[in-house]
Amino acid sequence: MTEITDYILILTLLPVAVCDIYKRKIPNAILITGTSLILVSRGLQSLFCADTAAAFMALILLFPLFKFRMAGAGDIKLVAFVIFAKGIYDGAFICLTALFAAGAWSLFKLLRSGRCAERFSYFSAYMKAAMSGASPGPYFVMERDGKNITIAFALFVFAGAVLNYIF
């Protein structure tokens, strides 16, 4: 992609990461602004390209993670935005890098808090209910799990975009 797209991506992801860290929310307004700036920089014809189709596919394929509260809606929209901005290959690389780094950080937090066995027990019960055809309910419940167990995924996406730009 063009360098202007990289700048727009990184300058969009920075405030998104800050909001995700402090508010645990990803503002739609920032993502819409970033998407609009990319459309303007590429020309409106880019709305009808493979990157747009890939972004919509990401939304569709990742929607079940939101439905079962395994990921926030903002995280899924963020992945779609990155894929739209960078294309399917670089976008997937950024998002997968972020996913692995966030997973490692999450595991570290679980081990440090001593809640690893508890979370794997929840996950096991959740998967058993899902496999049996029963409605498993949400995986993450704020009242039960608390805020300390969540991570700011946008921070890892921002770091992945910066690394992708540098290398």
Image (tube, grey):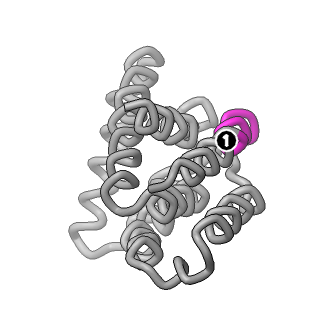
45, above or below 32, in the image: below
Q: Residue at x 42, y 25 (%)?
A: 110
The answer to whether any part of residue 89 appears in the image is: yes
Q: How many marks?
A: 1
Quadrant assignment, res 130: bottom left
Q: Residue at x 62, y 80 (%)?
A: 44
43, above or below 14, in the image: below
Residue 41, horizontal then vertical, whole percent: 64, 64
Q: Residue at x 27, y 57 (%)?
A: 127
Relative horizontal placement of residue 163, taking residue 7 as reference (left or right): left
Please report the bounds of the magenta region as a residue range: 15-23
Near-viewer residue (60 or 159) = 159
Residue 46, horizontal then vertical, whole percent: 52, 77
Which quarter of the image is occupied by the C terminus?
Answer: top left
Near-viewer residue (81 or 119) = 81
Near-viewer residue (34 or 127) = 34
Relative horizontal placement of residue 113, taking residue 152 as reference (left or right): left
Which quarter of the image is occupied by the N terminus?
Answer: bottom left
Q: Residue at x 60, y 29 (%)?
A: 148
Residue 133, horizontal then vertical, whole percent: 27, 75
Residue denoted by label 1 = 20
Query: In this view, which residue lies farthest toward the top?
Result: 112
Residue 157, horizontal then vertical, whole percent: 49, 41
Quadrant assignment, res 17: top right
